[in-house]
Structure formats: structure tokens, C-alpha cells
Image (cartoon, grey):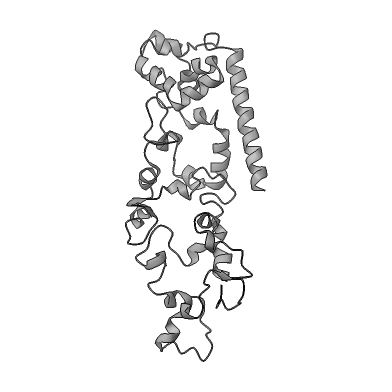
Amino acid sequence: MARRRRFFALVTVSIALAGLSLVLLAAGPQEKQGYTGLTTCATCHDDTAKAFKAGAHGSAMAARSGDLLEGACEACHGPGAAHAADPSKTNINRRPKPEACLACHPKAQALMALNLPAHARNGILCLDCHTPGHTPAPARPLLAAEPSALCAKCHGDIAANFKMPYTHRKGDKPFDCTACHTVHGENRTGRLSEYGKGAVCAECHIDKAGPFVYPHPPRSASGCAECHKPHGSPNPKMLSRPRVFDLCLECHTGLPSFHDITKPKFQACQTCHIAVHGSNHDPNLKDD
């Protein structure tokens, strides 16, 4: 299913780019009513035009067609003839709306509306996260900042968790949010790639991935975050409780009578139940 979705998404993007190219090629910017083209824009905005041509947006357009690049400014900012004749802030679209971006990136609109409604509800627009490409971007793909810093502007409570003693870091730097999250909702579960089964965690923690003959039910049902705090924790191994014993008791309330939990040996669950992520040999998880 995932491969099929990726195939149809690629087909959609290809058709959209081909259609845009044909429209602009069929009627160059000089021939369209009210349009002037990048060459005219560059008479006043020379530095911006040069930077755009050298950047990711301009390079991608130029590789496809010179005419596509020539129409780039007005594809986002609207017809520029009136502005060229009488330069004013009122007769040009200075900050393009998302529709301008989505003319070339239709996949983002469909997937975000389905999987990331909170971004839309809170008025998050393309240029809140991305740069338009007029100058070199601080991070790829055309991001206004590194992903961890960019996301932290809204998700400050999550960013604070990366200061915990135990968290996901590369050296002293937090993992980029995009290492785990698909920010445009590029799958059916949205923000986190196949999060329900912990699949995104298993990309790094391969030894915990399974499948197991005897899986640990919490992981199978709710994913790794049933026991772990993925953004950071004061507890070793990023557990949600200070002791493994306390964590186990959240589910295992009906203990056998010989488990006298007032005694220390019955408070060290992993002394016996070593295969906490699942076992191929023992239903009680006493053997890997």
C-alpha cells in the first residue's frame, strides 16, 4: 500500500509540473496579459533575481525550461506589468499565498489537509516554515531555520524535553524533528511515520523491531511510546517511570500470589523477564 501511495503521489506531481510547464511554454510571460517576465523584474531587483537563479528553486526551473524560469517571479507574485510601470507596494503580491506554492507542489496540500489538520486550523502557511528562495536558505529543503529550531517556535514544550538528561541527541545536538516526523503528512498516519507500531523507532533500534513469536502486547498495540518518552525523559532509557517495576505495574496489576512485591527481588522484573520487547522462545518473556 505504501509503495502504491508513493507511486500515485509521484504521478500527481509529475502531471502538475508537466501541466505548468506546458502552460508557461505555450504562452511565455511576455505574451500573457499583464506579465513581463523575470528579465524585466531584474532591472530593479537584480540581486534578488541572481540569487533566485542560483538557488534551489531557480535551478530546478532552469533545468526544466528557460521559459519556466522566466515566468518564475510572476508565478508567485502575480502579473508585474503594472508594478513595472509604477513601482508600488500596493500593485504587486509581496507575500505569496499558499496557492502559489501549491500550483507546483499539489501533493503537500492534499496530504496536509488529510493528515495535519492542526497546521491548517492554526493558520500555518508555507512561508512560515520555508523561504521563497530569493536568498540561500539556512537549511534544506528551503527551510527558514534548522528543523529543530523551526519546529520549536510552535512546539516549545516538546523542544524543552530535549534538555532532559536522557533524550535523542547526536553528540550535544538534538535530533532534527524530521528524523522521525513527516511534516507534510506523507502517510496515512500523518505526523509520525507508521508510529502506531513503533516502526519509525525500529529504523534505528533494529534489534527491538521483531517480529516476535511472543510480542510484548503494549508495543504491539500502542507502540514504543507506551513505555518510553520519545522526546526526552529524566529516566534512563527514556522510560516514562523512574523504575521499570513501576512501569510494569501500570499493566500487570494481577500478579501471581508468589510475587510478593514488598520484597526487592520481585521489584526487579527484568531479572527474570529479560525479553521486554518480545521473545521467540518464551511466552512469559523470560528468554530472547
Can residue 223 be seen in this snapshot? no
Residue at image position (59%, 20%) is: 21
Front-lying residue, 258 or 273 = 273
Locate residue 102, reporting x and y percent.
Answer: 53, 31
Q: In terms of image quadrants, where is residue 95?
A: top left
Residue at image position (65%, 33%) is: 11
Q: In this rendering, is residue 214 above or below 4?
A: below
Locate residue 209, reporting x and y percent.
Answer: 56, 61
- Name the image quarter holding the C terminus: bottom right
Q: In this rendering, is residue 16 above or below 170?
A: above
Query: How many numbered tags mark residues here?
Result: 0
Can residue 201 be seen in this snapshot? yes
Residue at image position (53%, 15%) is: 66
Q: In terms of image quadrants, where is residue 7?
A: top right
Q: In terms of image quadrants, where is residue 247?
A: bottom left
- Apparent side of residue 75 relative to residue 159 in the rendered image (left or right): right
Residue at image position (48%, 23%) is: 59
Q: In this rendering, is residue 167 above or below 13?
A: below
Most distant residue in the bottom direction: 258
Locate residue 24, reporting x and y percent.
Answer: 57, 16
Locate residue 213, reporting x and y percent.
Answer: 64, 70
Front-lying residue, 249 or 205 = 205
Front-lying residue, 286 or 36 = 286
